[in-house]
Image: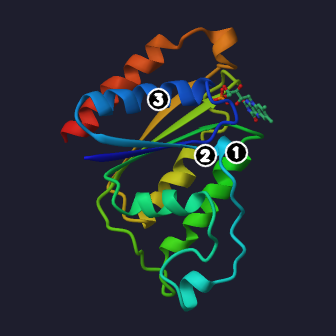
Amino acid sequence: MKVTGVLGSPRSSGVSSTVARRFLEYAAKSGATTGTYNLAGMHYSGCRACERCKIDLKSCALKDDLTPLLRDIHDTDLLLLASPVYYGEVSGQFKTFFDRTFSYFESDFSCRIPAGKKAVIILAQANPDSSMFDDIFPRYKHWLEIYGFSRIELIRMCGVESIETDGTLEKECLAAEKLAEEMLES
Ligand SMILES: Cc1cc2nc3c(=O)[nH]c(=O)nc-3n(C[C@H](O)[C@H](O)[C@H](O)COP(=O)(O)O)c2cc1C
């Protein structure tokens, strides 16, 4: 099984990345082939709406650090997406990456990537009220379903600010490992 992690926090050892790494480490120990993309360390542009991916190409016309990631997702079985909540949304780094997945659509909006993948979305927010920003997951789940993903799970952390203030997040990391175990099996 191939597992690809996308870390959307500018903090490489932040809350969402720490929990995501534990998921990925568990998957690797269980025999999965894992890859991790730390968006904060990558150079890439937003979608330019050039439509080349619909007109004369089968992939995004932009060539930058997202190119191998967008290609990797094609043959990934499990995609792990992690982001902090910024102003009630995912981080700018994450949103810019996600817009580039527009290149997965054919001109008739059928999808180019193989169906049946699984995904886990990890979201971290400082606000302890879980009713706040609970619209983020359903929105990204919706797009992943359009891309043919068959199972999409959420790991959500509310009331967490940083590893410095909230400790090692061992409970959340163990929950991530448990979910990894279950998703690698099924
Ligand atoms: C620019 C910015 C915007 C933020 N906006 C929100 C927000 O709208 N709601 C919230 O609960 N927390 C917000 N936070 C706090 C982060 O979501 C929180 O600290 C999170 O745990 C950080 O995760 P990370 O360590 O994975 O980056 C914001 C933080 C920053 C730096």
Q: Quadrant of the C terminus?
A: top left
- Mark 3 — residue? 21
Question: Tag 1: residue type?
Answer: Glu
Task: Report whether the residue tagged 1 is closer than 8 Å to ligand 1.
Answer: yes
SS class of the residue under badge 1?
loop
On residue 89, the disc is: 1
- Mark 2 — residue? 136
| Residue drawn at point x = 31 percent, y = 33 percent | 27
Q: Is residue 71 left or right of residue 51?
A: left
Q: Is residue 185 left or right of residue 130?
A: left
Query: Looking at the image, is mark 3 or mark 2 nearer the viewer?
Result: 3
Q: Are marks 1 and 2 in contact (CB under 8 Å)?
A: yes
* Residue 97 found in image quarter: bottom right
Horizontal and vertical percent position of residue 100: 61, 65
Relative to the observer, which residue lies in front, 67 or 46? 67
Q: Is residue 82 left or right of residue 182?
A: right
* Residue 87 found in image quarter: top right
* Residue 154 found in image quarter: top left
Q: How far separated are the C-alphas under marks 1 and 2?
A: 6 Å
Relative to the observer, which residue lies in front, 8 or 149? 8
Mark 3 vs mark 2: which is more N-terminal?
3
Horizontal and vertical percent position of residue 169: 52, 14
Query: Looking at the image, is mark 3 or mark 1 nearer the viewer?
Result: 3
Q: Is residue 3 left or right of residue 52?
A: left
Question: Tag 3: residue type?
Answer: Arg
Mark 3 vs mark 1: which is more N-terminal?
3
Question: Tag 2: residue type?
Answer: Ile
Q: How far separated are the C-alphas under marks 3 and 1?
A: 22 Å
